[in-house]
Image (spheres, rainbow, N blue to C red):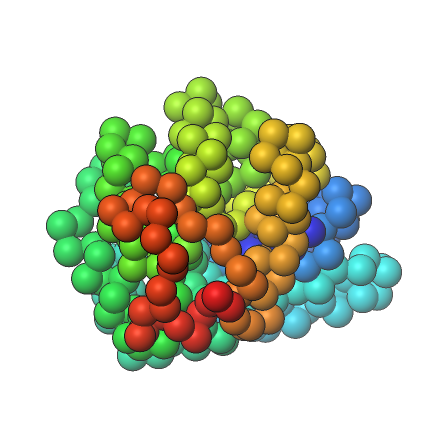
Amino acid sequence: MIDVHHHLLYGLDDGAETIEDSIAMAKMAVEDGITHVVCTPHASHRYKFRQEENAVRLASLRAELASRGVPLVLGQGCDLHLSWDNIQDAKANPAKYSINGKQYILVELPDQFIPAGLSDTFIDLQSAGLMPIVTHPERNPAVQRDPSKMKAWLEEGVLVQVTAGAVLGRFGSKAQALSHRFLENRWVHIIATDAHNTSSRPPKMREAFELIGKTFGHDTAHRLCVSTPLDVFEGKVLGPQPRPAGLEDDGRPMEKKSLLGRFFGR
């Protein structure tokens, strides 16, 4: 399995505190069946994103894992909070925040309200060569109040990442119910751990993978946990994606939009 949202780098945010914490999380991920992890420290008002420092810590962690025989492939990315400054910098420096310097970028919504111009923001990022992946909307209070807000983003081709723990009920009943609703509606493209530690926010996907496979089919579980996140990790065009249900043009053949055609293999 491939985990594209994981706070593995130590001493940068509210994820791993020390390199030993990072190593423990990496070992737990491997034991769970995870083969690739994108290290995604926050870029927010609280946590400043320092690209060069992140790269140094990523290199040291890679070397330490190799010396201990931990077979985990690491990549670099960011958990980008959608502030005005971050959006402007991401448009000016796309590779700074994107996953492995390619076209996919994790974006976190504001908690309490959805800005009126958010769809325009996503289009602006796409125009800069970036494909937004909205992280854990099932846990977002504003989305929980009105999930229909996601329809406009899905119609623009924006991708959606749901948290493995939310599928299992570990972020409360609201997040669990909404994650299953999104899965039923085919509004989810990627499952990730959003791991922060080995206890309350562990780097585990196996149980969610198995539950999704049992409920929605093995092909769905494989697409969400393996094939699509691997394409994202490698910066490739995505394989075929099912049409989300409930959109305005639901039932008609999916057409490539001029900005988005290179992101999807349809």
Question: Would you place residue 44 above or below residue 53 in this image?
Answer: above
Report how many numbered discs are placed on residues in the image: 0
Residue sitting at 36 percent across and 68 percent down?
A: 256
Residue lying farthest left? 116
* Residue 12 in view (yes/no): no
What is the x, y in percent for residue 55? 56, 72
Question: Would you place residue 212 above or below residue 265 in this image?
Answer: above
Q: With 168 as the anchor, is 30 left or right in this view? A: right
Residue lying farthest front? 252
Q: Quadrant of residue 131?
A: bottom left
Residue sitting at 50 percent across and 56 percent down?
A: 241
From the viewer's side, name the closer residue of 16 and 129: 129
Q: With 171 as the anchor, is 48 left or right in this view? A: left
Q: Quadrant of residue 67?
A: bottom right
* Residue 222 in view (yes/no): yes
What is the x, y in percent for residue 159? 41, 55
What is the x, y in percent for residue 123? 25, 66
From the viewer's side, name the closer residue of 193 and 182: 182
What is the x, y in percent for residue 158? 36, 57
Residue sitting at 24 percent across and 69 percent down?
A: 124
From the viewer's side, name the closer residue of 50 and 215: 215
Residue sitting at 47 percent across and 27 percent down?
A: 176
From the viewer's side, name the closer residue of 164 and 76: 164
Residue lying farthest top? 173
